[in-house]
């Protein structure tokens, strides 16, 4: 198993993605494999911001836009 990890780590990012995709393909052919990637739960876990959370950004935008550019 160590040599497998060493070989995988020696690959560049593109090749690692290809290996991961191929393993996902092989696993998807097995009936008893359930994918750990549950996109619905991942999307639902994305945080949402309320208007009060965004208020600090609006205040900072006003302050930033009120800066005067110094002339030389």
Image (cartoon, rainbow, N blue to C red):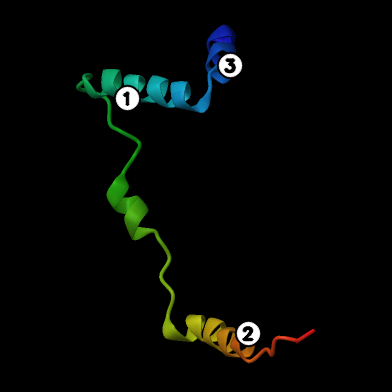
- Are dots 2 and 1 in contact, CB under 8 Å? no
Q: CA distance from mark 3 to mark 1?
A: 20 Å
| SS class, disc 3 | helix
Q: Quadrant of the N terminus?
A: top right
Measured from the top left, where is residue 68 in percent x and y?
69, 90
- The mark closer to the camera, 2 or 1, is 2
Which residue is tagged 3? 10
Q: Residue at left 58%, top 16%?
A: 10
User: Of the residues under marks 2 and 1, which one precedes in the sequence?
Assistant: 1
User: Of the residues under marks 2 and 3, which one precedes in the sequence?
Assistant: 3
37 horizontally vs 17: left or right: left
Vertical order, 58 against 38 (above or below): below
Which residue is tagged 2? 64
User: Of the residues under marks 3 and 1, which one precedes in the sequence?
Assistant: 3
5 horizontally vs 33: left or right: right
Q: Nearer the viewer, residue 29 or 34?
A: 29
Q: Residue at left 28%, top 17%?
A: 26
Image disc number at residue 24: 1
Q: CA distance from mark 2 to mark 3?
A: 46 Å
Measured from the top left, where is residue 15 in percent x and y?
45, 21
Q: Quadrant of the C terminus?
A: bottom right
- The mark closer to the camera, 2 or 3, is 2
25 horizontally vs 3: left or right: left
Measured from the top left, where is residue 43 in percent x and y?
33, 55
Q: CA distance from mark 2 to mark 1?
A: 48 Å
- Are dots 3 and 1 in contact, CB under 8 Å? no
- The mark closer to the camera, 3 or 1, is 3
Vertical order, 63 against 44 (above or below): below
Measured from the top left, where is residue 39 in percent x and y?
30, 47
């Amino acid at each position: 198993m160590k040599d497998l990890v060493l070989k995988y780590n020696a690959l560049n990012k593109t090749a690692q993605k290809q290996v991961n995709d191929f393993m996902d393909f092989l696993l998807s052919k097995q009936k008893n494999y359930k994918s750990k990637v549950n996109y619905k739960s991942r999307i639902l876990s994305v945080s949402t911001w309320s208007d009060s959370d965004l208020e600090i950004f609006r205040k900072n935008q006003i302050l930033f836009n009120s800066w005067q550019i110094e002339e030389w």
